[in-house]
Amino acid sequence: MSNGKTELLSPTPAGIACAAGLLSDGQLVGLPTETVYGLAGDATSDMACARIFEAKGRPRFNPLIVHLPSLDAVERIAILNDTARALAATFWPGPLTMVLPLRDGHGLSPLVTAGLETVAIRLPAHPLMRAVLDAFGGPIAAPSANPSGRISPTTAAHVLAGLDGRIAAVLDGGPCGVGLESTILAPSGSGTRLLREGGLPREAIEPLTGALISDTTPGKVQAPGQLSSHYAPQTPVLLNSRLTDPNAIHVSFGPGDADLSLSSSGDLIEAAAHLFSTLHAADALARARKAAAIHIAPIPDHGLGRAINDRLARAAAPR
Ligand code: TXA
Ligand code: MG
């Protein structure tokens, strides 16, 4: 654990240089990406990777996503087949993670891969994350920057709310544009498996890969976001609500009165971008008003709605 306070770094050349310097020193830094904020450490350092698990309070050593600046950097660490190459050309940089076979001499800490023969890789699009990758010059391991089981962070304030005093710094990039974690795919010769719904919708992917093989069952060992209760506010959550219970905090989607709205115009992209900050806000409101529950209106189950409903189901799952 880092001693004392977590520094809030400004989105300036000095802030970027400071973040990269801390990573080189084996420290942990909260970094903005277009999906959610990451809890970043040097992916080649066992100490830094061990600190990531400690800071998150992860119940077990799940493998971590490795963030890289370029396809060249990916080729040095992993092996891409034709499908992986096509996906990379179309969707990187962006909210896509691919699980790929490791290349010999990859140099990653075994804590990153949890001893698997594969590695999860992503080329983020966020300009600050890319600037830190360039300045640091190596692979960055980064799970979402929340304590294990809690709501993912989409602002620097969310990161501090969960991890203040446990990490060296947070680079403030404002709110994340996508607001949901990356979609995780495992492309292989026999078809592409979908391991986690996320910021890149299935409808965008399937024209390239053919029908995806769903492999997102909660409870499976390598299934990401695998604990069925996850992304959980402290207050119990009820889904598909008609928002009529006066003792609950109401979260709407589409027109109508409510305490909070994911998107008053019923826009799934806006709802994804606001999802985690709305859950943070609903939880705070529930505590302030001593409300017994958070009730959430139905969300259509297509496009980004699938990933939103996946996260909401985990937020509402029995603890
Ligand atoms: O958008 C994102 O992906 C964010 C930002 C920070 O990049 N990161 C993120 O990381 O969501 P994390 O650690 O919360 O989720 C990574 C998931 C884990 O649940 C893990 O099980 C899965 O990726 N994963 C990592 N390596 C894997 C592998 N070799 N095989 C299968 N799943 C893997
Ligand atoms: Mg996470």
Image (cartoon, rainbow, N blue to C red):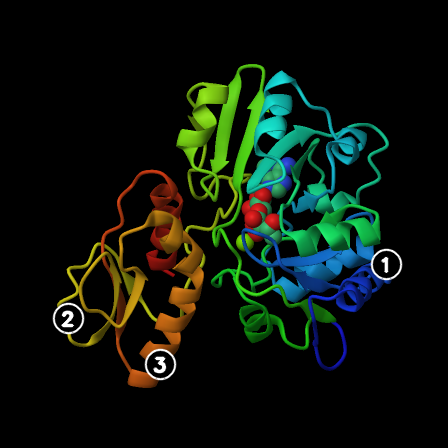
Q: Are marks 3 and 1 in contact (CB under 8 Å)?
A: no
Task: Assign the N terminus to one quadrant of the image.
Answer: bottom right
Quadrant hosting residue 251: bottom left
Residue 40 position, x and y percent, is: 70, 57
Mark sitting earlier along the chain (3/2): 2
Left or right: residue 237 compared with residue 152 = left
Calculate the distance from the C-alpha at mark 3 to the C-alpha at mark 1: 40 Å
Q: Are marks 2 and 1 in contact (CB under 8 Å)?
A: no
Calculate the distance from the C-alpha at mark 2 to the C-alpha at mark 1: 52 Å
Residue 281 seen anywhere in this rendered image of the structure:
yes
Residue 198 position, x and y percent, is: 47, 43
Mark sitting earlier along the chain (3/1): 1
- Identify which residue, 118 or 201, lies in the foreground: 201
| Residue under the image location 62 percent in, 46 percent down | 125
Q: Is residue 283 above or below residue 153?
A: below
* Amino acid type of the residue tagged 1 in the rendering: Ser
Calculate the distance from the C-alpha at mark 3 to the C-alpha at mark 2: 17 Å
Q: Secondary structure at mark 2?
A: loop
Left or right: residue 119 compared with residue 233 = right
Q: Secondary structure at mark 1?
A: helix
* Amino acid type of the residue tagged 3 in the rendering: Arg
Q: Which residue is mark 1?
A: 24
Q: Is mark 3 within 8 Å of ligand 2?
A: no
Q: Residues within 10 Å of mark 1 (few under 14, many from 20)?
A: some
- Identify which residue, 141 or 269, lies in the foreground: 269
Q: Which residue is mark 3?
A: 287
- Identify which residue, 5 or 261, lies in the foreground: 261
| Residue under the image location 15 percent in, 60 percent down | 242
